[in-house]
Amino acid sequence: MVVKPMIRSNICMNAHRVGLEIETQEQIEYVKQQEPLAGPKRVLVIGGSAGYGLASRIVAAYACGAETINVAFERPASGNRTATVGWYNTEYLESKLRSDGVYGATIYGDAFSNEIKDETCRLIRERWENVDLVIYSLAAPVRTDPATGETYRSVLKPVGEPFTARTVDMMTGEFREVTAEPATDDEIAATVKVMGGEDWELWIDRLTAEGLLAQGCMTVAYSYIGPELIRPIYREGSIGKAKEHLEGTAARLTEKLSKLSGRAYVSVNKAVVTRASSVIPVVPLYGVILFRVMKELGLHEGTIEQSYRLFAERLYSDGEVPTDEEGRIRIDDWELRDDVQERVNEIFHRVDESTVRDLTDIDAYHGEFLRIHGFGVEGVDYEADIEP
Ligand code: NAD
């Protein structure tokens, strides 16, 4: 079938298999060109089919030579529907791993459920005995608590008062003012339930109870802080409350892992274009400017560059893992550099519809949004009939 992008409200509903194969291959090539790392050997990635989780998995496999097990919520193609992005990414990556002789497997299903945790533990025991790195990279809108059966939905809203700001439609370049009403207490609590650290802790407790964590193991979950400009909607908003909870969980998990001399970290990563980040209000305007400024300063990174730097210069560099005062790994250091933020701020306040193409990287940002769904990839014939 011929597959064209179907986009609604910044959400792309379909995916192009051939484009995603090329995109995934580019990430593999990037890592192969870097120095090999003395890193982990048996890695569990929870949420390893797209975005930061996929990039982390590729670094583990191709820089460290690690075997990987991935857990992801994706579905194959059926009828006239394409598969999801993460399905195509994963199927391609695993075909490459097989031909390169490196073990990799994926359990498709809901990582929040007990059943998927059971299945994952079973596979780890059969295949490896234990794990030396657990990456937790879920970005989910909804979670059913396995203990109560209750379902929670996360929201992206400010806390306390409404937040009004200009944003840009990355498809059209049109500006508009958006107001986000504050989250209710229940909505904040639900967002913490979905995107906080509770499920990460359940995973680590379960792996510990089954004796599936290696001596000296590490676990890492991903967070974001971002600049003042988007603070009311991100760090001080409902999602920020969840990230605070995730960060608090890291300290508790490190205590729990002390018997194994293990460590839990939160890594604060930079803003990149992923399926999850495209739906956060105001972030696209910040993103298109950030892209321009970081490229001008030679500091631009995507998920694969960030993940390689995380492994090479933080997790598996010699000596202690460097962290900030709160114990967090900071790989958002370049994004938050004073010179970067000063320049972003200056553009943010003066850009408008007539200057957006000159002052920001809107076309490249939009291109990246399409590419993470397999569209707009060089060398792909989008008129061709493909087997989805
Ligand atoms: P993404 O949407 O690209 O990937 C999310 C992954 O989660 C996919 O593999 C998906 O299959 C998996 N997933 C979602 N629900 C699941 C479920 N119920 N069961 C199993 N798997 C499920 O997201 P991303 O942007 O890479 O985000 C990953 C983490 O990185 C999040 O914690 C996010 O907050 C953080 N982060 C993102 C950015 C950014 O700019 N995108 C910046 C800093 C930190």
Image (spheres, helix red, strand yellow):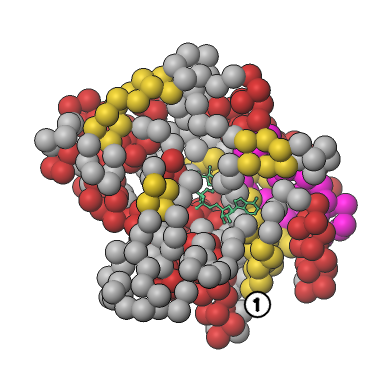
Q: Which residues are magenta?
A: 192-221
Q: Residues within 10 Å of mark 1 (few under 14, many from 20)?
A: some
Identity of the residue drawn at 47% across and 74% down: 388
Check the picture and name the quadrant holding the N terminus. Answer: bottom left
Q: Residue at x 57, y 38 (%)?
A: 328
Callout 1: SS: loop
Point 62% across, 36% down: residue: 153
Q: How many marks?
A: 1
Farthest residue toward the top?
161
Please indicate whether residue 62 sits to the left or right of residue 287 in the image: right
Magenta-drawn stretch contains 269: no
- Circle 1: residue type: Tyr
Please tell me which residue is depicted at 65% across the width and 38% down the height of the picture: 194
Residue 381, given in percent of the width and then of the height, sits at 29, 76
Q: Is residue 93 above or below residue 57?
A: below
Whether residue 294 is situated above or below residue 190 in the rendered picture: below
Q: Position of residue 300 (x, y in %)?
A: 31, 51
Tell me if I can see residue 94 in this picture.
yes
Is-magenta flag for residue 201?
yes
Q: Is residue 270 left or right of residue 113?
A: left
Query: In the rendering, at what x and y percent does residue 105 appear?
Result: 66, 72
Farthest-out residue, front? 79
- Mark 1 C-beta closer than 8 Å to ligand 1: no
Horizontal and vertical percent for residue 375?
Answer: 34, 64
Residue 35 seen from this side: no
Who is closer to the viewer here, 335 or 197? 197
Q: Label 1 belongs to which residue?
A: 103
User: Image quarter for residue 293?
Assistant: top left
Nearer to the camera, 387 or 291: 387
